[in-house]
Image: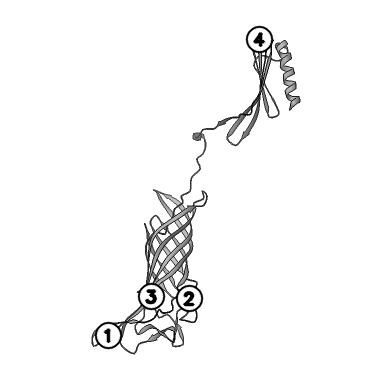
Amino acid sequence: MKTFFAILVFLASLGYVNASSFFPADTTFHYQNRMVVIREQPDEINVSVYRCNEAGDTIRSNKIYEGIFTDNKSVERRYENRFDIFVPDIFKPKEKRKVAASHWAGFGIGFSNLPNGFDFDGEIASALNLSRSLQYNLNFFDNHWRLGNNGFSLVTGFGIQFNSLHLQNNKYMEVMDYKTVISTSDEVLHKSRLHFTCLTFPLLLEVNFPVGCGETIFLNAGVVGKIKTASSSKIWLKENGKERKVKQPGELNIRPLAFDLLMQAGIGDVGFFLSYSPFTLFLNNKGPQANQGTIGIQLYF
């Protein structure tokens, strides 16, 4: 570097003595990644050196040296500052920013089943009335965190899940010897149902795809933690043409803590959901082997 500047000073000094012999007025030449500009004025020669670098769409030109030579004196400066010339945004292709949103808060309703079935009378069969076994989801709020600029986000929130499982006629649920079992009624049984309510806390991964007109197609999936808050079982008996409601005692051995695997998909504020609980509805050895599965629709706030 010192040799390079020494040569420049030497050439500039000679150039001042006889500028026309070495350089024409306002001469520019390149040496490796440097640009040397020599400007001649009356009784003065100006020598400027720039370091040039071109990276992507930005041209950087760094002035690193300037020498001014006259017959009386010479002035030399070295620069550390940098001059950046940016290509205006209007000439750059704009990167489309992917949409990141969350779909949890809202109200949904779905049909529930117990795919493993209930074990009663030595047979594996479903004791549910599927047309009347429903799940209601009221999700109060959600929040999400964008994961980069790829449309993915992490979703959390809070909600309440209410389950109403209705059994077939002449079947009802009771606790015998501290175990929940399905029994057959000897009386005229009109209907029987099981209610249980849970607080829900989701952790979902969601991706959104814009489809125009301000709408997006979304898909999310993850786990939903559940804390049971209440449960009850009731039957309705018909006697002499009158209906009598009987509440079954006990907590029915429903798990206090559980989680569902959840998948949701839809467009805009309307979608459908699928959920499945990998754990049985009842505590181990305290009730039938029954894993709950639900499919339904959801309206999002």
Q: Amino acid at mark 2?
A: Thr
Q: Residue 220 vs residue 196: left or right? A: right
Vertical position of residue 126 compared to residue 27: above or below: below
Q: Alpha carbon of mark 4 to alpha carbon of mark 3: how far?
A: 101 Å
Q: Residue at x 66, y 12 (%)?
A: 44
Residue 43: mark: 4
- Crowd class of label 3 (few under 14; some 14 to 19; many from 20; radius 10 Å): some
Q: Alpha carbon of mark 2 to alpha carbon of mark 1: how far?
A: 32 Å
Instruction: Tell me which label, 4 or 1, sits earlier in the chain.
Output: 4
Q: Residue at x 72, y 15 (%)?
A: 13
Q: Alpha carbon of mark 2 to alpha carbon of mark 4: how far?
A: 97 Å
Determine whether label 2 and label 1 are within 8 Å by CB: no
Viewer-side label of 3, 2: 3
Viewer-side label of 4, 1: 4
Mark 4 residue element = loop
Q: Alpha carbon of mark 3 to alpha carbon of mark 2: how far?
A: 16 Å
Q: Residue at x 49, y 73 (%)?
A: 279
Q: Nearer the viewer, residue 90 or 149?
A: 149
Vertical position of residue 113 compared to residue 60: above or below: below
Q: State the residue position of label 1.
A: 238
Q: Amino acid at mark 1?
A: Lys
